[in-house]
Each structure stands twice: as C-alpha cells, then as structure tokens.
Image (cartoon, rainbow, N blue to C red):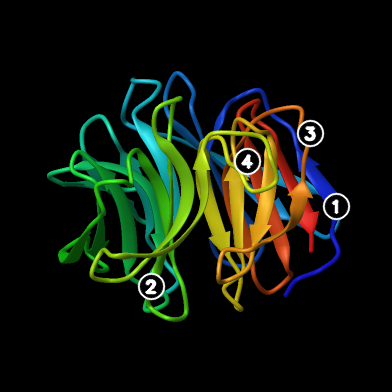
Amino acid sequence: MIIGRSQTLEIQSNEEVRGVTFKGLGMLYVLRATSKDQIDVYHINVADAVITDTFDYFSTDVDNFWDIASSTTSCFIYVSDHVERDICQVAKGYETIAFGLNCEPRGLSMLRNGMLLVTCRYPSKLVVLDYDAERMSETSLDATIEYPWHAVQLSTGDYAVCHGSGPYSLHRVCIVARSGRIVKSFGSTSGQARNELNVPCHLAVDEHDFIFVADCLNQRVTLLTPTLNFVYHVVEHMRSRPQRLYLEQSRKRLYVGMKDGDVIVIQM
C-alpha cells in the first residue's frame, strides 16, 4: 500500500484537461479541450515542468477528444474521439490514423500486455485493441453499469470500472470479471459521504492493485483497496474538478488533471 503524500508540482493552464499520460523519460503528455483539441508535451524534472511541444489535432470541434493513453511497447499514443466514434493512433512524428468503433469510446488505459483497453458506451462494454487498433476482445458490461467512464485492469485479470452520472444512476467503482459479471462494488447513489461518489470519472491503479478514483463532482481523489474498501482521500476540497489521473509507478507520482486546466503532481 502506498502511504504518505504531498503536492510536489503544479502545471498551470486555463485549458481543460482531457487526458494525462507519460511517454519516454520524463515526458508528460496532456490532452486539452481547446478550439482545436491539443496535446501539450512537458519535460518533467524534479521540481518543475517545461513545455517542449504542442500538437493541434486535425479536428476543429472542441469536445471530440476524451482521453489519452500511451503504449508501453511501441511509439504510439492513442486518443479517443467519442463524437466520431474513433480511436486515433498518433505516431512519434504526430502522424495520425483513425480507427472506427461501433460504440462511443470514452476512457483509455493500457493493459499489462501492452494492448489498449477502451471503455465504451452505447452499448456499454470494454474493448481490447492490439497495437494496430485491431479488435481482440469485448466484454459487455452489466446493465446496472450506466454511463461508464473509465476502466483499468488489475493483476488478477479483472477490471475496475467507474461509472455514473446524474441523480438517477448509481455512482460506483466496480470490480468486473472478464465475463462481465460484477464481483464487488463501492458506492451507490451519488453523495458526499466517505463511502459515496459523485461522478467517479477516472481511475489509476498501483502495482498492488490499490485504486485511485477521481471523484469529480466531490472534488477529491479517493484511494480504495483491491477489494474496494475505503483507505483515505488522497486530496480533497480541490478548487476544481479532478477529471483525469495518471500514476507514474517508478517515481510514485500521481498526476491529477483538472477541469480548470491545471495538473497537480502528488508524491505518494
């Protein structure tokens, strides 16, 4: 279990964060919602972050792009386009290829084998894509998992899935077997109590399967055990909504991308 935490760095911007990932040695990629969906690239040192590049996407629509993930086994970065229902594969030179899906892709994460896990709506399912965005498998989600946002894979092979939006749906983190069966859940209807969530929109997982949850409308980040017991709020009473998480395992740093555009870095 990771214990102890302190904020070590803050990357400031006024452009909403849609995704955070790492690529290479100390290179942070931040997907932003701008007049053209944009990736900012930062070199992360011990105490500061220096922007080194900006990549404007081919789309002129502000809200097309939803999340970003980087391959650990190739040079590719992947971006989900929930409007066009595409996964965009971005190469090292920023050449982009779009692959169509028959669902609305939202959150992205990398599996331990280097493949891409896509959390989809309409219908709600998890899709695994290989290195060239070829579909390898699908897992249909239980009907009670409405408005899925993001999923990560655990060391058991099961998935942690966060979902929920609005007053009439459940707001939970669920452990989901590869068959789609719900094994365990945390949360219920939306709320502010310790055992409640309000739009849990993004996850990160450490090497021991402890799960970090971006509890968006409660403006806090919550840590859960592998069996979905509450541990503590990593950070709470935030000035803006936490929308994206990335855990840099080697340095035990949690990156929290916020709606106001800032990225805070928490040393665990």
Most extreme residue toward the left is 102
Q: CA distance from mark 2 to mark 4?
A: 26 Å
Q: Find numbered disc 1 in the image and state the secondary structure of the residue it sits on.
A: strand
Q: Earlier in the sequence, mark 1 or mark 4?
A: 1
Q: Disc 4 marks which amino acid?
A: Gly
Q: Find numbered disc 2 in the image and state the secondary structure of the residue it sits on.
A: loop
Q: Find numbered disc 3 in the image and state the secondary structure of the residue it sits on.
A: loop
Q: x, y (%) of residue 124? A: 24, 46
Q: Label 4, on which residue? A: 257
Q: Label 3, on which residue? A: 237
Q: Earlier in the sequence, mark 2 or mark 4?
A: 2
Answer few, some or many: residues within 10 Å of disc 3's Cα (few below 14, many 20 plus, some between 14 and 19).
Answer: few
214 shown above or below 262: below
Q: Quadrant of residue 64?
A: top left
Q: Disc 2 marks which amino acid?
A: Asp
Q: Label 2, on which residue? A: 158
Q: Earlier in the sequence, mark 1 or mark 3?
A: 1
**Residue that appears at 64% across and 31% down:** 241
Decide which of 184, 68 is in the foreground and name it: 184
Answer few, some or many: residues within 10 Å of disc 4's Cα (few below 14, many 20 plus, some between 14 and 19).
Answer: many
